[in-house]
């Protein structure tokens, strides 16, 4: 590019300096009109040799004439006038002194070159500073992005995983992923944009670079940093949305029975409209396998390879749900167990189900892996209570996601932790958790009498393995059977708050003694391993002294035949005049029995019409109710059994 053209492109501050170089001695118009010719002459040589200066000066006048002719053809009157005036001025001033004009032009050209060099150097410095500022700001942006990502993965995501642990053992189901998904997707989008900008820096480097170029020095580190951030975010954002669970036991996840199908759902935070059609290839699969870190080994049967898709997600993200997986134990020569971890029982062995896949994005390969929370594998459903106890204890006491050696030395828990988890076992499957009084009763059974149980420590053995004092079963076996009893037989009564459940004998007497005769409460049996419920009522003896009476607990076997509400409504005893009366009048504190239980009773079947057979036959429920009344009276008053048989059984048409 001609020197004069380069000068025209300078910034205003340099153009101002250029204007000061020219005057009437050598007008700028002449420099503009004859720029190529002027730059082609050796003015420095002419300034020192008069003969050459004379030649160049006459050539200059000739160039002026040619330019004047061009303006004449263009009919440019103004330029014609200016050029004629310039020629006359030069002739009058330099015709006899051509070396003077040569020195003036030579100096102007030298000053122009100096000005161009100064401007070029300034531009290079400015560009270098700009590039340095770009890479510095980009480095700061990546540092800030790293901070945000650590906050998301180390705090927010870790908090979500902890909440998922709590939800698995019955705690509050606050495990919605929508907010986290929005945050992580936005962060991933930003990282991809930053990576594109870094690639553009590489293109700029290939076009223009120089010694000490900040882009050459810092771009590789920036590229490595953004790739590491994106890779780590991708690895962290793959989670198990729904932990392994058998469909028949949805309230007890993480316990898997061999030979029984279980489900598992893997989730990816990224939304396809932003990233995933670019990232995931169709052949990318998720494959689960079991980490064989324990003494038993298993094969995973069923469809154990799936493609991530949007159809299995509720919010448009990619997920893969395994619905038909089954475990089969590998048999060894010693009956299926190896010699490792011999101190652990089956329900204390923890396993991990791990999922693997590969992700590709713009030449970047990312190996992804995620795993379930530790699971317990059982071979018989009777192992479920102890297996569930292991799941409770693990997730109650640790937020470590992979500690399969947890039960080699299980930590102790505090009563505050245990109490919260025990209450969740009721609130997660019913409408009511446990009250402070109920929990205090349970604490007394576990720890013995104490003024304040807060902070008291409970060992794993005390919770699940050791028998309670004076009993042939552990605390957890007893409580788990009560939970099962509530869910299957007395759920409606529990939800109404009619069952006091866990209450000590002393507390029972204290709250019933002031109440009128016929007031009763419902509580769980402390002596029944299989889970039982009984009731205690207030009555007055002949002398008017208040007494507490109870019945033998009703177990699941009896409640299979008759609902507990029917039992309460039909319960009668023999009074002093040998008349069957109901001792149950008011449910504690003062709810009429009919009001509380009437709506839960089954209506009695109408008498069967005569069909030529025994016209006095009764339905089976009526017979069972009467039989229950007879047996109760027999336990209380054996001497009146024969009178009862005569007056009730035979009188109601039953064969004698």
Image: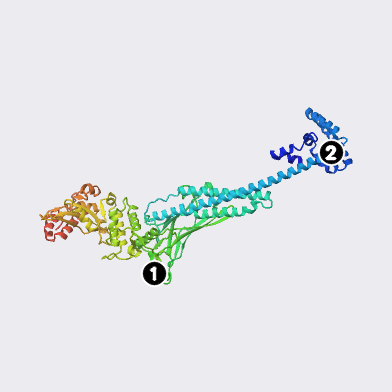
Instruction: Look at mark 1 in the image and give the residue it sits on.
Output: 343
Q: Quadrant of residue 119?
A: top right
Instruction: Look at mark 2 in the image and give the residue it sits on.
Output: 100
The answer, for residue 642, to whether it is visible in the render is yes
Q: Please indicate whether residue 299 sits to the left or right of residue 473 in the image.
A: right
- Horizontal and vertical percent position of residue 371: 46, 58
Q: Please indicate whether residue 135 sits to the left or right of residue 535 in the image.
A: right
The answer, for residue 266, to whether it is visible in the render is no
Distance between mark 1 and mark 2 Cα atoms: 110 Å
Task: State the residue in front, 288 or 80.
Answer: 80
Q: Residue furthest right?
A: 51
Does 97 sit above or below residue 476? above
Q: Residues within 10 Å of mark 2 (few under 14, many from 20)?
A: some
- Horizontal and vertical percent position of residue 363: 59, 54
Secondary structure category for the residue under label 1: loop
Q: Please indicate whether residue 72 sits to the left or right of residue 211 in the image.
A: right
Q: How is the image coloured?
A: rainbow
Q: Residues within 10 Å of mark 1 (few under 14, many from 20)?
A: few
Does 149 sit above or below residue 82? below
- Horizontal and vertical percent position of residue 344: 39, 67
Q: Please indicate whether residue 84 sits to the left or right of residue 508 in the image.
A: right
Between disc 1 and disc 2, the foreground one is 2
Q: In the rendered image, which quarter contains the C terminus?
A: bottom left
- Horizontal and vertical percent position of residue 248: 37, 56
Q: Which mark is residue 61?
A: none
Q: Quadrant of residue 250?
A: bottom left
Task: State the residue in front, 10 or 91.
Answer: 91
Work out whether mark 1 precedes mark 2 in sequence or the reverse, and give the earlier one: 2
């Amino acid at each position: 590019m001609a020197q004069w053209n380069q000068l025209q492109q300078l910034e205003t501050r340099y153009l101002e300096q250029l204007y000061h170089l020219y005057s009437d001695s050598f007008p700028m118009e002449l420099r503009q009109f004859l720029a190529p010719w002027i730059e082609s002459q050796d003015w420095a040589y002419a300034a020192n040799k008069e003969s050459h200066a004379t030649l160049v000066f006459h050539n200059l006048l000739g160039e002026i004439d040619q330019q004047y002719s061009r303006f004449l053809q263009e009919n440019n009157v103004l330029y014609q006038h200016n050029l004629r005036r310039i020629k006359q001025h030069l002739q009058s001033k330099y015709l006899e002194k051509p070396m003077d004009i040569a020195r003036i032009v030579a100096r102007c050209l030298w000053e122009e070159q100096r000005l161009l060099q100064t401007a070029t150097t300034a531009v290079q410095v400015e560009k270098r500073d700009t590039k340095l500022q770009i890479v510095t700001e980009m480095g700061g942006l990546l540092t800030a992005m790293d901070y945000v990502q650590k906050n998301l993965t180390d705090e927010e995501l870790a908090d979500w995983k902890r909440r998922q642990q709590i939800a698995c053992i019955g705690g509050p189901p606050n495990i919605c992923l929508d907010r986290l998904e929005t945050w992580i997707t936005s962060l991933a989008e930003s990282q991809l944009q930053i990576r594109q900008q870094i690639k553009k820096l590489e293109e700029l480097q290939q076009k223009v670079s120089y010694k000490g170029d900040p882009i050459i020095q810092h771009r590789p580190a920036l590229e490595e940093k953004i790739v590491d951030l994106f890779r780590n975010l991708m690895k962290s954002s793959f989670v198990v949305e729904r932990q392994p669970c058998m469909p028949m036991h949805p309230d007890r996840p993480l316990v898997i029975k061999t030979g029984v199908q279980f489900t598992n759902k893997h989730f990816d935070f990224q939304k396809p409209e932003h990233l995933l059609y670019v990232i995931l290839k169709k052949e990318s699969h998720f494959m689960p396998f079991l980490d064989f870190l324990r003494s038993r080994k298993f094969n995973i049967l069923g469809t154990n390879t799936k493609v991530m898709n949007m159809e299995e997600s509720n919010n448009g993200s990619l997920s893969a749900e395994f619905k038909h997986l089954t475990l089969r134990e590998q048999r060894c020569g010693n009956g299926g167990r190896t010699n490792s971890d011999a101190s652990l029982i089956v329900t204390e062995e923890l396993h991990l189900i791990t999922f693997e896949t590969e992700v590709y994005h713009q030449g970047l390969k990312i190996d992804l892996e995620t795993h379930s929370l530790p699971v317990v594998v059982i071979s018989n459903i009777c192992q479920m209570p102890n297996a569930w106890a292991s799941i409770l204890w693990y997730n109650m006491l640790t937020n470590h996601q992979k500690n399969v050696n947890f039960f080699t030395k299980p930590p102790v828990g505090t009563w505050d932790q245990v109490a919260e988890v025990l209450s969740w076992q009721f609130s997660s499957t019913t409408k009511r958790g446990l009250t402070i009084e109920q929990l205090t009763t349970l604490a007394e059974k576990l720890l013995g009498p104490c003024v304040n149980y807060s902070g008291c420590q409970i060992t794993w053995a005390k919770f699940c393995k050791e028998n309670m004092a004076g009993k042939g079963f552990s605390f957890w076996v007893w409580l788990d059977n009560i939970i099962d009893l509530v869910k299957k037989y007395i759920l409606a009564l529990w939800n109404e708050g009619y069952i006091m459940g866990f209450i000590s004998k002393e507390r029972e007497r204290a709250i019933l003694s002031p109440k009128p005769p016929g007031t009763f409460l419902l509580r769980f049996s402390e002596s029944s391993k299989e889970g039982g419920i009984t009731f205690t009522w207030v009555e007055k003896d002949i002398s008017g002294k208040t007494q507490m009476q109870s019945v033998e607990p009703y177990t699941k076997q009896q409640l299979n035949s008759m609902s507990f509400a029917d039992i309460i409504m039909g319960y009668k005893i023999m009074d002093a005049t040998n008349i069957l009366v109901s001792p149950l009048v008011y449910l504690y504190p003062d709810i009429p029995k009919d009001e509380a239980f009437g709506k839960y009773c089954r209506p009695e079947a109408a008498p069967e019409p005569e069909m030529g057979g025994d016209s006095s036959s009764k339905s089976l429920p009526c017979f069972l109710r009467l039989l229950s009344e007879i047996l109760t009276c027999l336990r209380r008053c054996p001497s009146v059994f024969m009178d009862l048989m005569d007056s009730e059984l035979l009188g109601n048409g039953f064969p004698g």
